[in-house]
Image (tube, rainbow, N blue to C red):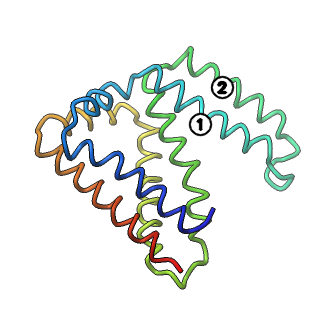
């Protein structure tokens, strides 16, 4: 992935997330409020994260336990399948967190050793903040429900957070076009 795309895609994602919050769009607020326990979001996000993770597991090199990649593939596949039956609560949050962690690798690889572009640090900073929140959110997924409850309790919080997210997304989009 090029550094341009690695910066532009998260910027557009943050814009798409932040603008409805800034405008307090009722549909977006309803969707986000129901997100932590949404079964359809769990199937999409956790299912997508499972497929991507199992793909990475299947393609492990011998240096990365690649001799056992078949056992790992089926073991993790069974755990993922049983997750839908045994622990369905907040599976959408866990799936989103795993996707953030999996997306972090190609984004950071695109910025690796690109010292001639100091503005890449806007991307790297956002990715590392995402990694920290993804680890925390995967360990305590109910905190997402609590955060969304706090965020939507007062309109100025929603607008402020949406404005902050959209502004950073706009910064990332602008930074993407500064690479030569």
* Crowd tier of the residue under label 1, counting other residues whose Cα lies within 10 Å: few below 14, some 14–19, many 20 or above: many
What is the quadrant of residue 90 in the picture? Answer: top left
Residue at 45% from the left image edge and 77% from the top image edge: 178
Q: Give x and y (percent) for residue 134.
A: 45, 46
Q: Give x and y (percent) for residue 97.
A: 48, 41
Q: Give x and y (percent) for residue 28.
A: 29, 33
| Real-space Cα separation, disc 2 to disc 1, in angstroms | 13 Å
Q: Nearer the viewer, residue 76 or 163?
A: 163
Work out whether mark 2 precedes mark 1 in sequence or the reverse, and give the earlier one.
1
Q: Nearer the viewer, residue 143 or 11?
A: 11
Residue at 53% from the left image edge and 67% from the top image edge: 4
The residue at which mark 1 appears reads as: 49
Q: Is residue 118 above or below residue 95?
A: below
Q: Give x and y (percent) for residue 43.
A: 54, 24
Q: Is residue 156 above or below residue 142?
A: below
Disc 2 or disc 1, which is closer to the eye? 1
Q: Which mark is residue 98?
A: none
Q: Which mark is residue 79?
A: 2
State left or right for residue 151 relative to residue 67: left
């Amino acid at each position: 992935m090029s550094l341009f795309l690695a910066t532009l895609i998260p910027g557009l994602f943050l814009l798409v997330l932040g603008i409805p919050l800034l405008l307090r769009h009722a549909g977006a607020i309803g969707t986000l409020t129901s997100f932590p326990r949404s079964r359809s979001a769990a199937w999409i996000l956790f299912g997508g994260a499972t497929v991507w993770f199992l793909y990475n597991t299947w393609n492990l090199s011998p240096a990365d336990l690649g001799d056992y990649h078949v056992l790992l593939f089926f073991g993790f596949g069974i755990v993922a399948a049983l997750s839908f039956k045994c622990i369905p609560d907040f599976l959408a949050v866990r799936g989103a967190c795993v996707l953030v962690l999996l997306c972090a690798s190609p984004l950071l690889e695109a910025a690796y050793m690109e010292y001639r572009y100091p503005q890449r640090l806007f991307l790297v900073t956002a990715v590392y903040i995402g990694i920290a929140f993804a680890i925390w959110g995967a360990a305590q997924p109910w905190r997402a429900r609590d955060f969304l409850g706090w965020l939507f309790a007062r309109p100025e919080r929603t607008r402020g957070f949406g404005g902050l997210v959209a502004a950073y997304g706009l910064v990332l989009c602008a930074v993407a076009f500064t690479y030569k």
